[in-house]
Amino acid sequence: MDFEDTPDEAAFRAEVAGFLDRNLPEGGVRYHDMGTMEEKARRQREWQLILHEHGWSVPTWSAEWGGRALTPAKNVIWRQECDRVGVGEGVLNGGLSMLGPTLIAHGSQEQKERLLEPTARGEILWAQLFSEPGSGSDLASLATRAVRDGDDWIVNGQKVWSSFANVADMGFLLVRTDARKPKHQGITYLLIDLHQPGVEVRPLIEMTGGNHFNEVFFSDARVPVANQVGAEGAGWGIARTTLMYERSSIGSFSVLGHFERLRDLIRERGVPVDAVTADELARLYVRARSLDLLNKRVLTKVSQGQVPGAEGSVMKNEISDVMLAAADIGIRLLGEDALAPGHAYEHDFLFAPSMHLGGGTEEIMKNLVAEQVLGLPREPDAFKGKPFDEVPRS
Amino acid sequence: MNFAFSEEQDEFRELLRRFVEERWPVAETRRLAETDAGFDRAVWKQMADELGLQGLAVSEAHGGQGFGMLELGIALEELGRQLAGGPFLASAVLSNFALSNGATPEEHAEFLPGIAAGTSISAWADAPGLAVDNGRASGRVAWCIDAHNADLLLLTTRGGLIALDPGADGVSIVAAKATDLTRKYAHIELAGAPVRKLGVGLDPDAAAVKTRHQAVIAVAAEQVGAAAHCFDQAVAYVKERLQFGRPVGGFQAVKHRAADAYAVVELARSAAYWSWWVAANDGAELGEAAHVVKSIASEAARTAAYENIHLHGGYGFTWEHDAHLYYRRAAANEVFQGDPVAHRAALAVELGVLVAG
């Protein structure tokens, strides 16, 4: 056990820090500071090209696909250094942390050769097209359908909660290709070009007043069979890979940063802190620190070749709680000032409720922990084995 | 960064787990709770002779194994699972810390070999209220773990560490009944008792602070073991208990309680392992680690002990079930050396978000 950087890790940290300090564009690449969604996309892509030129665009991918196959420990260092200067994947998250790893695991050689490099460069901006108005927690009940027409799939239906779809070029899409099979067996995983007449993207305005998610409508949209990932009907298993990467991507957000922002605020503004608030701040720190350590424990397991389990689900719930608590404390410390529209803590306060919804709700995460880690019985399914088209839908 | 124990450490854990499950399972702890001493001298001797456990974290020069807080943490976690160990905490851990930090090398050579061999049992307490004057001490130490079992008493006073012979004139030690049935406590009354001042020439405040931080980290290790045991027991039970024709662990309300408990136990375990590493390396973060781990490990121990009772239903509320023994221990450990609220206040000061005092 050793929490210090090894000499090799220390050298790596210095290399990353040096690279970031030399190359970070003026004004930074902070998601919240980059204006409209189009502006975010433009600047994130510019930065991604710089990363790509220097071999840093997809550090966790395998070397074969342009990555550095970073060890989990080095990936932590990479993220820590990126956090330090406020750099994240932003609108490119779907491609870099969800679709890319999924394609590396399940895509055909031709798909990998055609799509991974432009994804790494930020040239293809990806949106996730999984959830539907009628299929949230029960994602496998999705009803957007696709039928074959020669070498194309013809897609009809609607998706929702698609981050960045309004600036995306392509989407990773789950469709129902056989409604006579039980729900998990009739799903196919497609990659769809969003720039076509049969696709309409409508930005959603969320309770923050801002736009992050979108609705996406398909009317006879076309996907060439070459863009089908895995076998027809095998989409659910591939989707689970994507979901695992999505949850671990959410779970790897810097947690201690939430405490540090509050501490800086207290110091810079001389905000008085009473004993009750101090206890809440300390609780937040204890939770965040322990969570950071749990994350490191899981990463050590991964680096020893063990498969990461549903621990990522614990992480996602815990980080959501930390964000909720941090926003509450921020408001308490600043009072009405924090509630001025556009204030960072006003935004966080309004955004926080989405944390326990996106990527699987708090309840679904707890089911996963209980069933997959603790081995408790699965939820009974009254329609298990029934064809999808015989199951009632709302 | 490497958050894994070495192979040797994993093997030591396995060995110890088998030893404790065979020789000192919670059923035995429960039987011993009815006795004044609370431990079986034969098993105590086996701990020393077969495993060298009492000397685990004593240097080889003094007859110990020379390991540090990582191995000691493993031992405490494993003993904590069965609420076992008797005076192990008082003697091999707390007294060992107090002497290591607050006594001179000559005094180490005098006291540590007996502790390491298990032939001498020592007890330690913080005693800031004692009046010590001219080699005599007076006053009361309300709670001292295993003082009535001790051959040597060590007390951290405002002036530094002192040693007492429990049999000396002016020393009265009375075994105390406590909520925690499986750890033995005593009240100490001193009326002009002869004492020996240890660690002359050392900084008594630095030694006292370090001993307290280490003590907290050690007890948190035990809390994690106890929490893990309660949690494992609860999960095993809800898998087999049938109601409405199904295992109750299949109901989502029960699953979510289990998932919540799992999260806090794993958070506490993560913080505990880190705190051992900090202590083992004499890290500058010792105070922070103690405050963090006291807060999260107390929460884990209380949560898991409570959930174990709750998830066993009425059966968990009976005297015959072991669940209450862990619930009692969780409360006792929670208030030992500062409760979580006090530790969070200290943490807030250390982190610069609260002004001291």
Image (cartoon, grey):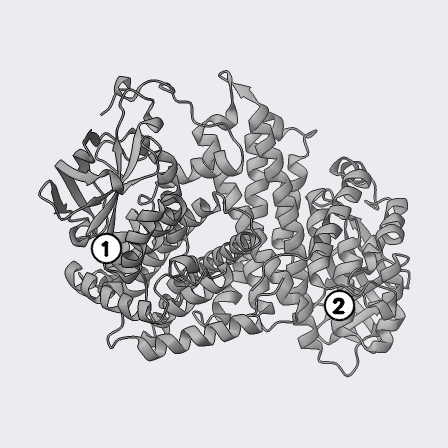
Residue sitting at the far left: A197
Residue sitting at the far bottom: B201
Q: Nearer the viewer, residue A368 or A90?
A: A90
Residue A125, which numbered label?
A: 1
Q: Nearer the viewer, residue A357 or B151?
A: A357
Quick check: A344 above or below A367? below
Q: Is residue B313 visible?
A: no
Q: Quadrant of the N terminus of chain B?
A: bottom right
Question: Which residue lies at the image location 84% right of the left edge and 76% below the top edge?
Answer: B135
The secondary element bearing badge 2 is classed as: helix
Q: Chain of mark 1?
A: A
Residue B98, which numbered label?
A: 2
Q: Nearer the viewer, residue A247 or B204?
A: A247
Q: Nearer the viewer, residue A32 or B153?
A: A32
Q: Nearer the viewer, mark 1 or mark 2?
A: 1
Amino acid type of the residue tagged 2 in the rendering:
Ala
The secondary element bearing badge 1 is classed as: loop
Amino acid type of the residue tagged 1 in the rendering:
Leu
